[in-house]
Image (cartoon, rainbow, N blue to C red):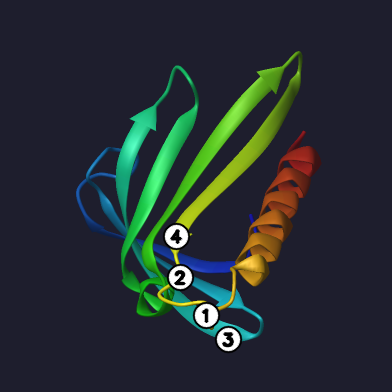
Amino acid sequence: MSPLHVQGCELLEGVFGTVGSKICWTYTLEGKEKISKQVIETIDEEKKVITFKEFEGDLVNEYDNWKATLHIETKGEIDLVCWTMEYERPNENVPELVNLLDFIVGMSKAIDDHHVKMN
Protein backbone atom coordinates (compact mmCIF):
# COMPACT_ATOMS: atom_id res chain seq x y z
CA MET A 1 0.00 0.00 0.00
CA SER A 2 2.91 2.34 0.64
CA PRO A 3 6.04 0.86 -0.98
CA LEU A 4 7.94 4.16 -0.99
CA HIS A 5 7.67 4.22 2.79
CA VAL A 6 7.55 0.60 3.98
CA GLN A 7 9.39 -2.15 2.12
CA GLY A 8 8.75 -5.07 4.44
CA CYS A 9 6.91 -6.42 7.44
CA GLU A 10 8.13 -9.72 8.87
CA LEU A 11 6.54 -11.61 11.74
CA LEU A 12 9.28 -12.50 14.24
CA GLU A 13 7.16 -14.13 16.92
CA GLY A 14 3.49 -14.77 17.65
CA VAL A 15 0.54 -14.25 15.33
CA PHE A 16 -0.07 -11.12 13.24
CA GLY A 17 -2.64 -8.88 14.84
CA THR A 18 -2.32 -10.21 18.40
CA VAL A 19 -0.93 -8.66 21.56
CA GLY A 20 2.63 -9.78 22.23
CA SER A 21 3.45 -10.42 18.58
CA LYS A 22 6.84 -9.19 17.43
CA ILE A 23 7.24 -7.64 13.99
CA CYS A 24 10.24 -6.35 12.03
CA TRP A 25 9.48 -3.43 9.72
CA THR A 26 11.90 -2.29 7.00
CA TYR A 27 11.34 1.25 5.83
CA THR A 28 13.03 4.20 4.14
CA LEU A 29 13.37 7.47 6.05
CA GLU A 30 15.06 10.43 4.35
CA GLY A 31 16.55 8.10 1.72
CA LYS A 32 18.09 5.73 4.28
CA GLU A 33 17.02 2.14 4.90
CA LYS A 34 15.92 1.58 8.49
CA ILE A 35 14.54 -1.24 10.62
CA SER A 36 12.16 -1.26 13.52
CA LYS A 37 11.46 -4.31 15.64
CA GLN A 38 8.24 -3.78 17.54
CA VAL A 39 5.99 -5.65 19.90
CA ILE A 40 2.25 -5.11 19.79
CA GLU A 41 1.49 -3.87 23.30
CA THR A 42 -2.25 -3.31 23.12
CA ILE A 43 -5.17 -3.86 20.78
CA ASP A 44 -8.62 -2.51 21.48
CA GLU A 45 -10.86 -3.47 18.58
CA GLU A 46 -13.89 -1.69 20.03
CA LYS A 47 -12.05 1.62 20.30
CA LYS A 48 -9.98 0.90 17.13
CA VAL A 49 -6.63 1.41 18.89
CA ILE A 50 -3.33 -0.44 18.53
CA THR A 51 -0.03 0.36 20.27
CA PHE A 52 3.44 -0.67 19.09
CA LYS A 53 6.60 -0.44 21.21
CA GLU A 54 10.00 -0.62 19.57
CA PHE A 55 12.40 -2.97 21.33
CA GLU A 56 15.20 -2.98 18.75
CA GLY A 57 16.09 -0.90 15.71
CA ASP A 58 17.16 2.50 14.50
CA LEU A 59 14.82 4.52 16.72
CA VAL A 60 15.81 2.92 20.03
CA ASN A 61 19.46 3.34 19.07
CA GLU A 62 18.91 7.11 19.52
CA TYR A 63 15.71 7.50 21.57
CA ASP A 64 14.44 5.84 24.72
CA ASN A 65 11.04 4.19 25.18
CA TRP A 66 9.72 4.77 21.65
CA LYS A 67 6.06 3.86 21.31
CA ALA A 68 3.40 4.60 18.66
CA THR A 69 -0.36 4.39 19.03
CA LEU A 70 -2.70 4.29 16.06
CA HIS A 71 -6.32 5.25 16.67
CA ILE A 72 -9.04 5.23 14.02
CA GLU A 73 -12.09 7.35 14.76
CA THR A 74 -15.11 6.99 12.50
CA LYS A 75 -17.34 9.99 11.88
CA GLY A 76 -20.19 9.10 9.56
CA GLU A 77 -18.55 7.39 6.60
CA ILE A 78 -15.16 8.98 7.21
CA ASP A 79 -12.30 7.31 9.10
CA LEU A 80 -9.96 9.73 10.85
CA VAL A 81 -6.45 8.46 11.61
CA CYS A 82 -4.64 9.66 14.72
CA TRP A 83 -1.02 8.67 15.37
CA THR A 84 0.61 9.37 18.73
CA MET A 85 4.35 8.95 19.22
CA GLU A 86 5.89 8.79 22.67
CA TYR A 87 9.63 8.78 23.22
CA GLU A 88 12.37 10.20 25.38
CA ARG A 89 15.37 12.09 24.05
CA PRO A 90 18.51 11.13 25.96
CA ASN A 91 19.60 14.78 25.91
CA GLU A 92 18.67 18.13 24.34
CA ASN A 93 21.16 17.64 21.48
CA VAL A 94 19.08 14.79 20.05
CA PRO A 95 16.47 16.30 17.70
CA GLU A 96 12.71 15.87 17.97
CA LEU A 97 11.32 13.27 15.56
CA VAL A 98 9.71 15.72 13.14
CA ASN A 99 11.13 13.75 10.19
CA LEU A 100 9.40 10.59 11.44
CA LEU A 101 6.15 12.49 11.89
CA ASP A 102 6.40 13.65 8.26
CA PHE A 103 7.06 10.03 7.26
CA ILE A 104 3.96 8.80 9.12
CA VAL A 105 1.78 11.50 7.52
CA GLY A 106 3.08 10.60 4.05
CA MET A 107 2.58 6.89 4.68
CA SER A 108 -0.97 7.47 5.97
CA LYS A 109 -1.81 9.51 2.86
CA ALA A 110 -0.41 6.78 0.59
CA ILE A 111 -2.48 4.12 2.37
CA ASP A 112 -5.59 6.31 2.06
CA ASP A 113 -4.91 6.81 -1.67
CA HIS A 114 -4.56 3.03 -2.06
CA HIS A 115 -7.95 2.44 -0.43
CA VAL A 116 -9.62 5.17 -2.49
CA LYS A 117 -8.31 3.59 -5.72
CA MET A 118 -9.64 0.19 -4.63
CA ASN A 119 -13.14 1.61 -4.12
Q: What is the distance, in whole Å, between disc 4 and disc 2 at their CAs? A: 7 Å
Quarter of image, res 98: bottom right
Q: Provide residue 16's location: percent of width, then percent of height.
A: 32, 45
The mark nearer the N terminus, 3 or 4, is 3
Q: Examine the rendered structure and indicate whether residue 110 appears above or below residue 115.
A: below
Q: Are marks 1 and 2 in contact (CB under 8 Å)?
A: yes
Q: Residue at x 71, y 63 (%)?
A: 102
56, above or below 45, in the image: below
Question: Split into 4 quadrants, where in the image is the N terminus?
Answer: bottom right
Per the model, the C-alpha gap separating discs 1 and 4 is: 12 Å
- Quarter of the image for the C terminus: give it: top right
**Can residue 22 be seen in this snapshot?**
yes
| Mark 3 burial class by Cα count in 10 Å: few <14, some 14-19, many 20+ | few
**Amino acid found under the numbered disc labelled 4:** Tyr
Determine which residue is flagged by label 1. 94
Q: Nearer the viewer, mark 3 or mark 4?
A: 4
Q: Do the residues labelled 4 and 2 touch (CB within 8 Å)?
A: yes
Q: Position of residue 20 (x, y in %)?
A: 22, 44
Mark 3–mark 2 CB contact (< 8 Å): no
Mark 1 to mark 2: distance in Å? 6 Å
SS type, badge 1: loop
Q: Are marks 1 and 3 in contact (CB under 8 Å)?
A: no
Q: What element carries label 2?
A: loop
The residue under label 4 is: 87
Kind of residue at badge 1: Val
Instruction: Give percent across and percent down for residue 15.
Output: 24, 44
Observer-side mark, 1 or 3, equals 1
Q: Is residue 58 left or right of residue 22?
A: right
Counting residues from the start of the chain, the first of labels 1 and 3 encountered is: 3
Residue drawn at point x = 72 percent, y = 40 percent:
115
116 to the left or right of 36: right
